[in-house]
Image: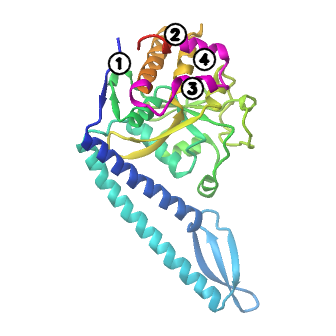
Amino acid sequence: MPFIFFPYSDLQIKQYHNAKMIYTSYLETLKSYNLTYRYKILWQKHKDGYELLAKQHLRTGKREYLGRRSVETEKIKADFLQAKVKVKERLKNLKEKMKREEKLNKLEGIARTPKELVTIFRKINELNLDNKLIAIGTNSLYNYEVRSAVFIEQEHLATRDIDLLNRKDKGISFIFNELMSSRHALALLHDIDSSFERSNEAPYRFINADGVWIELINPTSDTVTQASFKDNLFTDVIPLAMTGTQWLENSRLSKATIISENGQCANLTTVHPLEFAIYKNWLSKQEDRDYQKHIRDQQQSKLVTQLMKEYMPNIDIDAELEQMRHFKKEVVLDYIDNILKKDV
């Protein structure tokens, strides 16, 4: 039986794009501020009596000297302070606009993603780690449904566990280094919610006071075929050698703005929907897969395939399958025979 999707109304499409536009502007302005203005600028008296213009990092306290006091350095200071005030004012204005959009998102009925997922990805966005920490698993469906401007039936959507993959082929952002003093997973999670604690059952699992699970998949790096960076993010999470993870690591990415139950926005990055469908079909066939998860995996592969056929005309499934190289040929052929060629 085909899955049922509920398309956005014209008003919902309009509201979604308005909210996305404001959130995108906020992230761009925040990035500009973090790259340029997370400093204070001051005069420092030298032991020989003259003054030096210094730029001091707000987190580390490290100073960079720009020259002796002069007409030129006084102008540098004045221009910096004036520009910083403008950027901070712009950020304040955008935050106020986002608050208004959050109310409209709820009013128009497009606020439905679990708030925990949005909170986590909002932090990932602000640290410029969008292409490094990506969602895998059922939460990917929130990305695909907004890409398609439809609602997926609630029964097919995620539970309260969140799986994040640390892609080893992507480097740590400059902004992350600027803002975070630690590269440990628990430090990042505590910056989001101080109640997160490591599970005693699984060293890659973290649970907060509300019972939300986050599993950080820190795969062994030899599965990555693209150019590698030295990756020392989440050194407190034991790397896992999981069969099939290499396909997710080397997959194309899909980014979309999701909207929380409370109206807030975040950009969620996950694997391309076609790769997701192929992977889920393969995963459902693994002998050690729990039966309930096996059924859910197959359903999700069928659901996303139907979604691509009906609402993603820019994806030429047949042509893209011909070019698919990072999956084994037999895995792609099994998806074609058991999912694509059957009525979904």
How far apart are the alpha carbons under marks 1 and 4? 23 Å
Q: What type of secondary structure mainly makes up the magenta span?
A: helix
Residue identifier under label 3: 319
120 within the magenta span: no
Q: Is mark 4 on a helix, strand or loop?
A: helix
| Badge 3 amino acid | Ala
Q: Residues within 10 Å of mark 1 (few under 14, many from 20)?
A: some
Residue identifier under label 4: 332
First along the sequence among labels 1 and 4: 1
Q: What element carries label 3?
A: helix
Residue identifier under label 2: 338
Q: Residues within 10 Å of mark 2 (few under 14, many from 20)?
A: few
First along the sequence among labels 2 and 4: 4
Q: Do the residues labelled 1 and 4 touch (CB within 8 Å)?
A: no
| Badge 2 amino acid | Asn
Which residue is rendered at x = 64% and y = 67% of the image? 61
Q: Where is residue 52 in the image (x, y as percent from the top left)?
A: 69, 84
321 within the magenta span: yes
First along the sequence among labels 4 and 3: 3
Q: Where is residue 111 in the image (x, y as percent from the top left)?
A: 31, 40
How far apart are the alpha carbons under marks 4 and 3? 13 Å
First along the sequence among labels 3 and 1: 1
How far apart are the alpha carbons under marks 3 and 1? 24 Å
Q: Nearer the viewer, mark 3 or mark 2?
A: 3
Q: Quadrant of the C terminus?
A: top left
How far apart are the alpha carbons under marks 1 and 2? 17 Å
Task: Please state the extent of the stretch shown in magenta in the rendering.
Answer: 309-337
250 or 99, nearer to the observer:
250
